[in-house]
Amino acid sequence: MLVTRRLPDGGLDPLVAAGHEVLTRDGDEPFTHDELVRRVHDADALVCLLTDRIDAEVLHAGAGRLRVVANVAVGYDNVDVATATSLGISVCNTPAVLDETTADLAFLLILAAARLSSEAEHDLRAGRWAGWGINQYLGQDVHGATLGLVGYGRIGQAVARRASGFGMSVLHHTRRDTGDPGYIASLEQLLSGSDIVSLHVPLTEQTRHLIGARELSVMRPHAVLVNTARGPVVDEEALAIALEQGVIFAAGLDVYEHEPRLHPRLLAAPRTVLLPHIGSASLATRTRMARVACEGALAVLAGERPQNLVTV
Ligand code: GLV
């Protein structure tokens, strides 16, 4: 079993208990792509992270022996699932266990971006706060606002549950009608009808740059955009320009187009809250994710269908 990083304590327990030989790293340093290609050759199972690019080269290097790629993440855009499937390699992920933790972070970003908390704290720490002022840091109210969810899977629905406690009206848009109250078939209508928009779609060819200049232009000038899904769902340059020009009010982001690099214009854009991809980062949740991924790998090696099998 090749595990590409040191996992949270206890995360590897299922593999160890099953008596498998586990090759892992001591630290958080990832394998280089070349190392991954070399090492996967001798592995029956690969437990990897969303920052590992499991492309055709890695998969072909493992083919023959490698039976499963278990991604310690719900998103699996880093894995070439089509090639894996064609080589008979199963892919699994870690849905469900991170829903509530990620929804908490989405809500943190909703609140922080709407209330300009990063700018206010930054000024305070820099000694720029001269005292209470009636016109300072005037944000947008979250309570009573209309929240538009783009994507309405488990995490989107967990955000919706939190929103009800804030007395918000909740709309959602997905490609297929959910039949649930608040469904809006047109993305444009959802964007133009929401005060706060939160993104909860996976990254696919259909969702890449789903939110670009045109979509931002139909949003309300006081609107807040939050992204805890995947960076490339938003055209970052278009977002930076929209913030600079006041096309929308604020943005709260946890994910970026080219992680860990940030678009310089986005870094400098006003009214932004920027976090380093920590949506699922609670100790309990990250430990659960590691375990779920390991259990998926074990199921495949035992000839069973893993609970979280990803299909093309
Ligand atoms: C985190 O981004 C995940 O996909 O689990």
Image: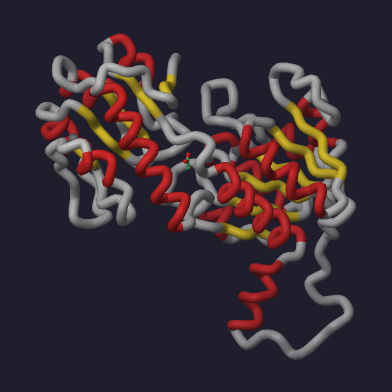
Rendered-image quadrant of the N terminus: top left
- Please state the horizontal and vertical placement of residue 115, each as a whole percent of the image: 76, 64
- Position of residue 299 relative to residue 279, above or below, is above
Tell me which residue sits at (64%, 76%) in the image.
Answer: 121
Q: How many numbered discs sit on the rendered protein?
A: 0
- Please state the horizontal and vertical placement of residue 251, each as a whole percent of the image: 68, 52
Can you name the residue that lies furthest to the front here?
17
- Please state the horizontal and vertical placement of residue 61, each as a whole percent of the image: 16, 22
- Position of residue 43 relative to residue 256, above or below, is above
- Position of residue 242 relative to residue 154, above or below, is below
Tell me which residue sits at (59%, 27%) in the image.
Answer: 207
Tell me which residue sits at (31%, 52%) in the image.
Answer: 10
Q: Is residue 190 left or right of residue 305?
A: right
The colour scheme used here is: secondary structure
Q: Is residue 166 left or right of residue 7?
A: right
Can you name the residue that lies furthest to the bottom here?
130
- Please state the horizontal and vertical placement of residue 199, each as a whole percent of the image: 65, 39
Picture quadrant where residue 214 is located: top right
Tell me which residue sits at (83%, 60%) in the image.
Answer: 140
- Residue closer to the observer: 192 or 27: 27
- Residue closer to the observer: 179 or 126: 179
Rendered-image quadrant of the C terminus: top left
- Position of residue 271 relative to residue 312, above or below, is below
Can you name the residue that lies furthest to the top here?
86
